[in-house]
Image: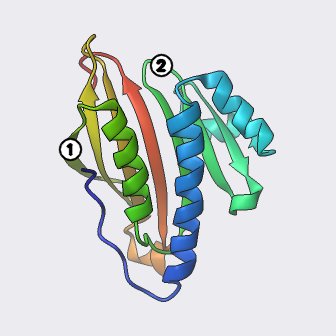
Amino acid sequence: MFMLLPVVAATGASAANQQLSQMTALYEQVCLKAFPDDKAVQAVMMERNARPLTSDEVKITMGNDPARGWELAQYDGASVWLEFPPFHACSVRWHTPQIGDLHAYGSVAEKYESAKGGFHPIEAYDADQGDIHVHAVGEQRILPDRSSESLFIFDQHITDPKRRAAGEAGYVLRFVHQFAPPGAQ
């Protein structure tokens, strides 16, 4: 059911796939099982000895949006984010040299979506924000109150050739589980 991003083939694919496997398991535990219970998400982060991000660190990623974040040293700086309403979301984010094989994520997402029912693919998102290209795919279901629940995969990368040549290569991936208010886009 879930639309997967293409697999990027390159050296180091097994390391990227191992990292994807770890991030998928983390996402399933935190964002599909504990979330949307914010206290349950916080408890999982405490159990994993995650370092709470400071308000200044949160602001770098979230701007003025209300959120909390945790860094997980055991996952090479991967982070878990909890965004507060109006958009209530849980995400797992990390840097990777390549995208890798997303089938494990697809299996976890499909299992969740099948159990809940009503999910449909949403239009892919592609946009440039300065020197960063953002791509997202996902699925969504509309809830009885006209709010929505979505599962997304976002990937972003630097597009400026000079920045890439200076070492800003690779991707930032994030798996997101979001509840949005009625009419939100």
Q: Looking at the image, is mark 2 or mark 1 earlier in the sequence?
A: 2
100 versus 142 height, above or below: below
**Circle 2 Cα neighbour tier, 10 Å, few/some/many (<14 / 14–19 / ≥20):** some
Q: CA distance from mark 2 to mark 1?
A: 23 Å
Residue 113 can be seen, yes or no: yes
User: Going by the picture, which residue comes out furthest to the front?
Assistant: 115
Q: Residue at x 37, y 56 (%)?
A: 106
Residue, disc 2: 85
Q: Position of residue 11 (x, y in %)?
A: 49, 89
Closer to viewer: mark 2 or mark 1: 1
Q: Residue at x 58, y 23 (%)?
A: 37
Q: Position of residue 174 (x, y in %)?
A: 47, 51
29 versus 171 height, above or below: above
Q: Which mark is residue 34?
A: none
**Circle 1 Cα neighbour tier, 10 Å, few/some/many (<14 / 14–19 / ≥20):** some
Q: Position of residue 43 (x, y in %)?
A: 73, 31
